[in-house]
Amino acid sequence: MLVLPRRWASRCAAAVALAGAIAVPLFVLVATGQGQSEVTVIERSGELLLRHGTPYLAEPHTVAEYTPYLPGMALFGLPRALLGSDGWPVRMLGDARVWCAAAFFGCLVAAVGPHRTRLRLRLRLRLRREHRRRHRGGPVPASGPAVGPVGPQVGTQVAALIASPPVALPLCVSGVDLPLTGLCCLALALAGRARPLGAGAALALACALKWTAWPAVAVVAALLAATAGRRAAVRATATAVAGTAAIVLPGALRAPGPLVQQVFAFPTGRGGLPTPASSPLPGRILADLGPAGWYTSLTLLLLAGLAVAASLALRPPRDATGAADRLALGLGLAFLLAPAGRFGYLALPALLVLLARLSARDRPGADRARTATAVPAVPAPSVRAPALLAPPPRAGGCVRPAPRRPTTPVPARPRQPARAPARTTATAFPRTEVVTTP
């Protein structure tokens, strides 16, 4: 990378990191048919949805036969059900991990890409206008935000984050939680731009995948109510609820019992079989103590949810970064206090915090703050009187100076005579003499 120009070195390094951490391992794992059990569960649920209209088995006998996801997750298994698995190209196109990764990348591009393009176009047009004004000799406004090149490439930083082990490893072996993360980031970004319908649609897709995305509806509603008004919050909430119901209800009505047992009871440790999510987190440790510990864990979980809801009502977030922090706090507490969980679940709140801060660097305010220090504002030149007010030139070519406007003399105020200082007069007493007679 040392032989490349500086402007291309970071991009090439990010591309090499993505190829080495994601592209090559994912290709090898998909071509050889290796992966975690979540991939098989998603592909089987897609086949069941296509054949029977519900992604759940009526009587699962093993842990691998459980589907702990809402019906929306089965959509990523439909390509396998439609294409089959004959040949490595078909296996590659039908693998659920490929479509989960595509959904994740698409959400990130939709959250950051269009805004960056509009911002760069706006900055380029402003630079052209200022260049034309300087070329024509016109005045350049000194007020307003300074315009300059955009700071570090946010796309390169996002690519480096995706190539990191907390993201690259689950993307290659399972990829289940990545679409949920991308949709939550997209919903927060759209809510920060006061687009309630788009935010509601993204929330609907996320809530139809896993019920852990449901707290995001309250956070987005609080953000929109504080920045765009209550109507925008109501529109986003209604869109999210209606979209989630349209995706979930058809499969839920065909098999309501299996949905409750596999989606809600099994992940919390109340299913027919023990859940494999048994990392030694605080909630799991309490649940292992018995029924009293399980109910204690559930009580602490509800109290944490009420505390986050109270913070949203008392101090709602004002931007997408604050909303991401509040959602990450709620999800982190939920994963820690849940009766069953894994350490890998904590990657979701961490990604929300980091991606929200990286995408926030593309807001106009952030770019103005960066460019104001890099490119100082151009002072406005002195503007002379218009040529129409100047007198016509003489025959010799010399310009006669403009006559001065007569000024009316201001009469001077008469001076007041200075007062003499007050003097104190001493009283003269007659001189007396004492005469003595002999």
Image (cartoon, rainbow, N blue to C red):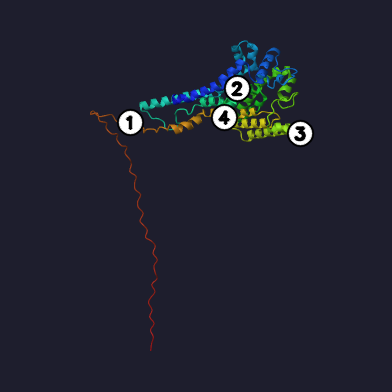
Q: Distance between the residues labelled 4 and 3?
A: 37 Å
Q: How many numbered tags mark residues here?
A: 4
Q: Mark 2 points at which residue?
A: 171
Which of the labelled discs sits on residue 354, or is there none?
Answer: 4
Closer to the camera: disc 1 or disc 3?
3
Answer few, some or many: residues within 10 Å of disc 3's Cα (few below 14, many 20 plus, some between 14 and 19). few
Which of the labelled discs sits on residue 419, or is there none?
Answer: none
Closer to the camera: disc 2 or disc 4?
2
Q: Nearer the viewer, residue 225 or 388?
A: 225
Tag 3: amino acid = Ala
Q: How far apart are marks 2 and 1 (CA)?
A: 73 Å
Q: In this view, does 121 lie to the left or right of 433?
A: right
Q: Which of 102 and 218 is in front in this view?
A: 102
Q: Name the residue under label 3.
A: 292
Closer to the camera: disc 2 or disc 1?
2
Q: Distance between the residues labelled 1 and 3?
A: 92 Å
Q: Mark 1 points at which residue?
A: 389
Q: In this view, does 304 lie above or below 12?
A: below
